[in-house]
Amino acid sequence: MERLTAKQNEKIKAAVSIRDSAKARRETGLFFLEGARLCADAAENEIEIYRAFFTGKALEKYSDYSKKILASAQECYEISEEISSRLSDTQSPQGIFCLCKAQEKNALGADIRPDGKYIFLENVQDPSNLGAVSRTAEALGVDGMIVCGGCDIYNPKALRASMGSALRLPIFTCDNAPETLKELGKKGMLTLASTPDSSAVKVTDVDMVGGVVCVVGNEGNGVTRDTMSACKVKVTIPMDGRAESLNASTAAAILIWEMVRK
């Protein structure tokens, strides 16, 4: 395995760029992963690993995870602790990093099941919320998550917050939320727009049999007007307390539960 020691090595500079820049991720078709468990999850889920970087200590300490990554990666490099500190986006780096091939799917593709259950995030900005929703979605068993605008689904913080769920759960993207929802509605899916407006239909009263897509909006502004109009039903989460709204990931968790429990 080739050893890299210079912080200005082009491979290291490229990895840092992909870690920090959504534009670099789009242009290269790669995304950045950090941590033994998360990188091993990529290998186990047959995500194509382009490059992997390990410190000598990490190869020994996380040998079981490292073996899976080494067996899957196209290129593997040993790096110094100094380079590990430069690559790391966390306070306590484990010394394992990967660049993986992005696997985005279009929401209007054939992989969307007309009888499936999907949570739709519109312009959600906080990577922690994006990661938390994907984790909940996988845990509760929806068929996938659709993301339009907002945080990049391959943001490193979002991937860490997902605890690996974003690597296992089918995630779809779209450029135009209203048009996508109209098309999904034409396929017979029930499209729901969530809102704190108490005049909307209580989500607990909605018949969730069959295909359902439920939209959660931006943390500050909620679902956009055009997207709201494109959905068949406006739904609200009944709240008897004094709070006027819920955190985006909390609202999504409740809506996902209502989709799957029926």
Image (cartoon, rainbow, N blue to C red):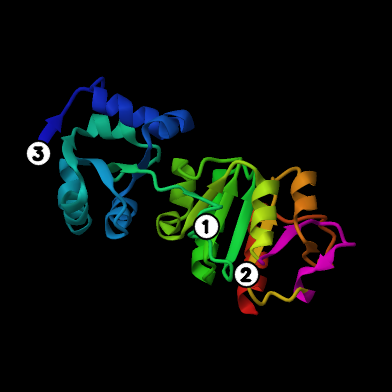
For image coordinates 35% across by 36% down, the residue present is 88
Residue 9 figure quarter = top left
Residue at point 67%, 72% (across, down): 258
Q: Residues within 10 Å of mark 2 (few under 14, many from 20)?
A: many
Magenta range: 188-205
Q: Amino acid at mark 3?
A: Met
Q: Residue at x 34, y 43 (%)?
A: 101
Residue position marked by numbered label 2 in the rendering: 211
Residue found farthest to the right:
199
- On the picture, is 45 further left or further right than 9? right
Helix, strand or loop under label 3: loop
Q: Position of residue 250 (x, y in %)?
A: 65, 59
Q: Nearer the viewer, mark 3 or mark 2?
A: 2
Q: Quadrant of the C terminus?
A: bottom right
> Vertical placement of 92 versus 47: above or below?
above
Outermost residue to the front: 186
* Residue underneath mark 3: 1
Compared to residue 126, the image places residue 184 above or below, namely: below
Residue beneath the point at 19% across and 40% down: 55
**Is residue 193 found inside the magenta-colored segment of the image?**
yes
For the N terminus, give its image quadrant: top left
